Amino acid sequence: MINAQLRLGVIGAGQHSRTRVLPAITRLPNVRLAAICDLAPARSAGAASQYAVPSVYTDYRELFASANLDAVAICAGPQVHTQLSIEAMRVGLPVFIEKPPAVSAAAAAEIWSVSRHTGRICMVGFRKRFATAYRKANAIVGSLEFGAPTLLSILRSSGPFAEDPDLPTTWFLLDFAIHVIDLARYMCGEVVEVFAWKVHRSTYAVNLRFANGALGVLALTADHGWASCEERVEITSAARHIVQIEYGVELKHLVEADVRSIYRPNFTTTGGDSFIETGLLGELVEFVAAVREQREPESNIESACRTMLLYEAIRDSATAGELRAVGSLQGM
């Protein structure tokens, strides 16, 4: 039985957790930030003090056993997501994990298997699915008026990534580009084939063929500076509709030269707060609602497995210089 005020625990008190996830949780109605756990006592104690969290742990198993939680959010690296999420579900807790769900599709499938067998929710934080502009774009693209999508193009750039083979959080394609790899599926459906090229350390040109017949192009690079990152998305249809999204927050819908709608948030008001516009708050609202309603959330672990299969097809195609079919969930 879930308490009237849902008791949420958080594993991980690193920078992303302290500056993005924890402050977003404090905005959720009828949710209590009940406990926090981190291997570094100073980090967990500092976060607990900042956000008035009553219970602090350095051992996640103690957290599971003693904190009387209704759900847990895991904000640690993907190399520990599989173990932590599986153990949480096995003790009866619904789980929210940050993207990417794991370091491989096979490891993500292990999480999915345990979610199915325990009946516990596992949601993955692909927050672009909950960003205001992208949700509006998804509704337009899915409308009868828009018609069949024919072309998706995405440009996404960042500053440099270390690409340390032993540290997945330094892998550009997995840690950063995975957001728009998932976004491609959200906007246009499943991808069946990819052909990718890679130059320098972290620059990719990717061709996609979707199951619905649409084509896609991803331009992904870590060769921009962090102060000049870009994110541009455009979806075109056979009915000559065009949806354009700039920097993930501004949307324009055109039919040929006729502008049908524009969405441009006002960041000087609480209604245009970046937690809302980037999807950070929306993904947590969806997780809490799914826990309360005992249903599968948007961006559940099954969907995340499909995103990981697409990521691996892009990675492997770029490495081999060959066309690659996107793997299937059957048998995973």
Image (cartoon, rainbow, N blue to C red):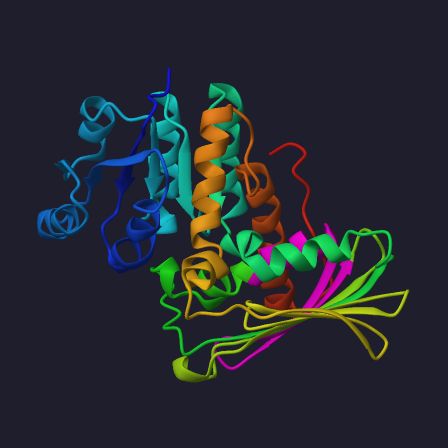
Q: Position of residue 238 (x, y in %)?
A: 90, 65
Q: Is residue 101 visible?
A: no
Q: Residue at x 41, y 39 (%)?
A: 96
Left or right for 49, reference 75: left
Q: Quadrant of residue 159?
A: bottom left
Residue 184, above or below 241: above
Q: Quadrant of the C terminus?
A: top right
Query: Looking at the image, which residue is at 61% across and 59% down?
Result: 134
**Which residue is more in the foreground, 265 or 124?**
265
Q: Which sits in the foreground, 155 or 238?
A: 238
Measuring from the top left, give residue 270's x and y in whole percent: 41, 60
Magenta residues (range): 180-209
Give the quarter of the figure containing the N terminus.
top left
Residue extending furthest toward the top: 1
- Residue 190: tell me if it is visible: yes
Give the image location of residue 171, x and y in percent. Answer: 43, 65
- Residue 83 in the magenta stretch? The answer is no
- The x and y percentages for residue 112 are 52, 33
Residue 192: in magenta span = yes
The answer to whether 263 is drawn above or below residue 305 in the figure is: below
Does 277 sit left or right of 60 as displayed?
Answer: right
